[in-house]
Image (spheres, rainbow, N blue to C red):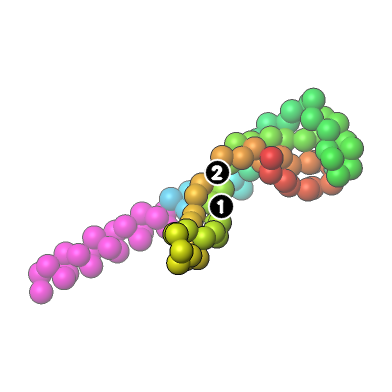
């Protein structure tokens, strides 16, 4: 019985810690100016980049992000089996401040 209470107590503490961290992050983001918020989510402006969607130069932000890529394929010799594998890929996420489009390279 004592064990269950201890495990339950630890679980509640972890949940409270996560909730406090999340609300802390939200307050931090809400306190940011629009420019700081854009930098937080989309990275710094790269003035050399041109948006391929609206051709605006100087408002495209770039940031390194990790994406989960799901791919299906066949493995095996005579008896082929469908497999699904998940890998992570590092991409450069771009965001245009003019037309609001976000895309990966
Ligand atoms: Zn654009």
Question: Would residue 92 be found to the left or right of residue 101 on screen?
Answer: left
- Where's residue 32, x and y in %? 63, 41
Q: Can you name the residue that lies furthest to the left here? A: 2
The image quadrant of residue 52 is top right
**Pointers 2 and 1 in contact (CB under 8 A)?**
yes
Residue picked out by circle 1: 69
Which residue is at a point 16% across and 70% down the rendered structure image? 4
Q: Nearer the viewer, residue 13 or 105?
A: 105
Residue 34 visible in the picture: no
Q: Which range is magenta?
A: 1-20
Residue lying at 49% horizontally and 54% vertically, measured from the top left: 86
Q: For the residue carrying disc 2, how many other residues have a C-alpha within 10 Å: few (<14), some (14-19), or many (20+)?
A: few
User: Does 101 sit above or below residue 36?
Assistant: below
Q: CA distance from mark 2 to mark 1?
A: 7 Å
In the image, residue 42 sits, relative to residue 72, either above or below, namely above
Q: Does the magenta segment cover residue 19?
A: yes
Residue 3 makes an appearance in the image: yes
Q: Which residue is mark 2?
A: 89
Q: Quadrant of the C terminus?
A: top right
Disc 1 residue lies near ligand 1 with CB under 8 A: no
Magenta-colored stretch includes residue 27: no
Q: Earlier in the sequence, mark 2 or mark 1?
A: 1
Secondary structure of residue under mark 1: strand
Q: Which mark is residue 24?
A: none
Residue 61: x and y in percent read 72, 35
Using the image, determine if residue 62 lies above or below residue 14.
Answer: above
Quick one: 16 or 52, which is closer to the camera?
A: 52
- Residue lying at the far front of the rendered structure: 78
Image coords of residue 57 (percent x, y): 86, 31
Q: Disc 2 on helix, strand or loop? A: strand
- Which quarter of the rendered picture does the N terminus lie within? bottom left
The residue sitting at 89% across, 42% down in the picture is: 54
């Amino acid at each position: 019985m004592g064990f269950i209470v201890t495990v339950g107590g630890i679980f509640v503490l972890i949940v409270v810690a996560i909730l406090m961290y999340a609300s802390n992050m939200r307050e931090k983001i809400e306190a940011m100016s629009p420019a700081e918020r854009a930098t937080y989510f989309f990275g710094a402006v790269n003035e050399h980049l041109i948006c391929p969607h609206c051709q605006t130069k100087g408002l495209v932000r770039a940031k390194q992000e990790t994406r989960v890529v799901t791919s299906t394929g066949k493995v095996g010799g005579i008896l082929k089996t469908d497999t699904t594998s998940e890998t992570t890929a590092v991409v450069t996420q771009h965001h245009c401040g003019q037309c609001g489009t976000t895309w990966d390279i």
